Amino acid sequence: MIEQDTIKLLRECDAGVKMGISSIDDVMKYVSDYFMNVPDYNNPGTMINVIPSVNVAAMASSSVACML
């Protein structure tokens, strides 16, 4: 049987995850506009031999990757 402390810990973890997801959603509202014209390298029509200039989306994603 599950102990009461385990149930309390799981509820706290659930609340923390929900808070984290809510924070990410809030940030994405402001950041998503910077990703509008980023080239889609999965598209076969994209010219992969052309080096794109550094844009805000690339800087933001590299900053987030460094935090992980």
Image (cartoon, helix red, strand yellow):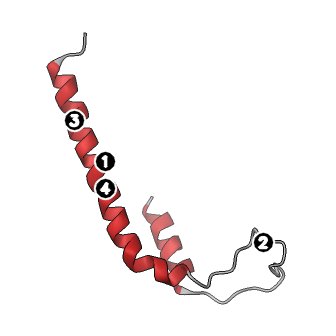
Q: Mark 4 points at which residue?
A: 20
Q: Residue at x 43, y 78 (%)?
A: 31
Looking at the rendering, in which quadrant would you find the C terminus?
bottom left
Residue 23: quadrant of the picture? bottom left
Residue 44: quadrant of the picture? bottom right
**In this picture, residue 40 sits left or right of residue 4:** right
**In this picture, residue 38 sits left or right of residue 68:** right
The CA span between labels 2 and 1 is 34 Å
On residue 68, the disc is none
Q: Mark 2 points at which residue?
A: 43
Q: Mark 3 points at which residue?
A: 11
The CA span between labels 4 and 2 is 32 Å
Tell me which amino acid carries mark 3: Arg
| Mark 1 touches mark 4? (CB < 8 Å) | yes
Q: Residue at x 25, y 32 (%)?
A: 10
* Secondary structure under the numbered disc 2 in the rendered image: loop
- Image location (x, y in percent) of residue 39: 69, 80
Q: Which residue is drawn at 48% across and 83% down?
A: 33
Tell me which amino acid carries mark 4: Gly
The CA span between labels 3 and 1 is 10 Å
Looking at the rendering, in which quadrant would you find the N terminus?
top left
Q: Estimate how packed mark 1 is, as few (under 14), some (14 to 19) or many (20 or more) residues with alpha carbons within 10 Å.
A: few
Whichever of callouts 3 and 2 sits on the residue coming sooner in the sequence is 3
Whichever of callouts 2 and 1 sits on the residue coming sooner in the sequence is 1
Tell me which amino acid carries mark 1: Val
Whichever of callouts 4 and 2 sits on the residue coming sooner in the sequence is 4
Q: Mark 1 points at which residue?
A: 17
